[in-house]
């Protein structure tokens, strides 16, 4: 597994009159775990959505694959499911695996593949539960399993631990470590400083309409900088 590098050139984005991202030139190294942190409204999710092509922007985003274009996995910040809908966890992931109607006969190898991914996030035993009956954190774990189906070389996570209990966070930490060691490129929006410190050698990027600072955990998350990490500011340097 060899993930891509990602280069941003003059990336800008605005919603109506509000400028969200402003003329960003930045490079995300291939095969590393990149964590985006910063204040709410600072543009972290918008940056991820721009990389995914889900929102219009100006400038250029180049995904530089080492050989040929690979698979991209995405876990959004949250998902809502109506509890009355008869979608089980297995149904939901199978539908995203095959894009075929649920009433079509499913090959046992497809079900086995889904169970293997659910096991990686500790959800195999809940495969027959309805999606709407799961907690928000459990739904996030299912979305994470779904994102792993295509063995992605680029995995994009938007606040992946939202609503998760300690068990879910542990599964996620282990998977991120495994994927990073295999050379996957990860981009992850996170707000939990403690959880970020547990990740394997992440590169931290502080986003507040621009990339304010980038570096390793000890440099960017130094104690004297934490007070300003989630505050809106316009200076190019973190105090």
Image (cartoon, rainbow, N blue to C red):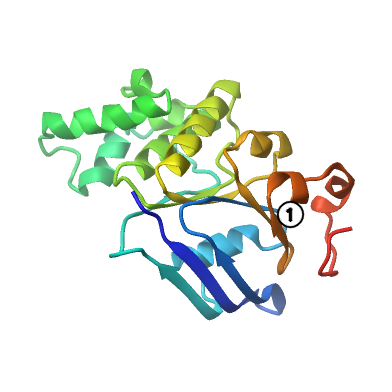
217 over 105 or under it: above or below = below
Above-or-below relation of 228 to 117: below
Q: Nearer the viewer, residue 109 or 185?
A: 185
Position of residue 110 relative to residue 35, above or below, is above
**Category of crowding for the residue at label 1, using alpha-carbon neighbours closer than 10 angstroms: few (below 14), some (14–19), many (at least 20):** many
Q: Quadrant of residue 222?
A: top right
Quadrant that contains the C terminus: bottom right
**Residue depicted at x 52% and y 60%:** 29
Q: Residue 132 placed where, x, y %?
A: 44, 31
- Which one is in front, 59 or 101? 59
Residue drawn 55% across the image and 21% down it: 167
Residue where numbered disc 1 is placed = 38
Residue toward you, 239 or 126: 239
Q: Is residue 147 left or right of residue 138?
A: left
Residue at x-position 29% and y-position 47%: 150
x and y percentages locating residue 163 in the rendered image: 60, 33
Q: Quadrant of residue 17?
A: bottom right
The residue at 86%/52% (across/down) is 228
The residue tagged with tag 1: helix, strand or loop?
Answer: loop
Q: x%, y% of residue 49?
A: 52, 63
């Amino acid at each position: 597994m060899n993930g891509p590098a990602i280069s941003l050139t003059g990336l800008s984005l605005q919603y109506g009159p509000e400028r969200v991202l402003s003329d960003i030139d930045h490079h995300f190294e291939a095969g590393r775990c990149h964590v985006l942190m910063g204040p709410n409204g600072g543009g972290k999710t918008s940056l991820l959505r721009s990389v995914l092509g889900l929102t219009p922007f100006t400038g250029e985003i180049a995904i530089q694959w080492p050989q040929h274009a690979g698979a991209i996995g995405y876990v959004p910040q949250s998902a809502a499911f109506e509890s009355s809908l008869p979608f089980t966890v297995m149904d939901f992931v199978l539908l995203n695996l095959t894009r075929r109607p649920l009433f079509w006969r499913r090959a046992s190898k497809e079900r086995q593949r889904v169970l293997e991914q659910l096991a990686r996030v500790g959800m195999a035993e809940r495969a027959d539960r309805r999606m709407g009956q799961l907690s928000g954190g459990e739904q996030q774990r299912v979305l994470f399993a779904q994102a792993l189906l295509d063995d992605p070389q680029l995995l994009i996570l938007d606040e992946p631990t939202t609503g998760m209990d300690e068990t879910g966070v542990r599964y996620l930490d282990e998977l991120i470590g495994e994927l990073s060691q295999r050379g996957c490129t990860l981009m992850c929006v996170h707000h939990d400083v403690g959880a970020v410190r547990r990740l394997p050698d992440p590169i931290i990027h502080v986003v507040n309409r621009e990339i304010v600072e980038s570096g390793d955990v000890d440099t960017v998350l130094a104690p004297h900088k934490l007070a300003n990490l989630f505050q809106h500011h316009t200076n190019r340097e973190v105090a």
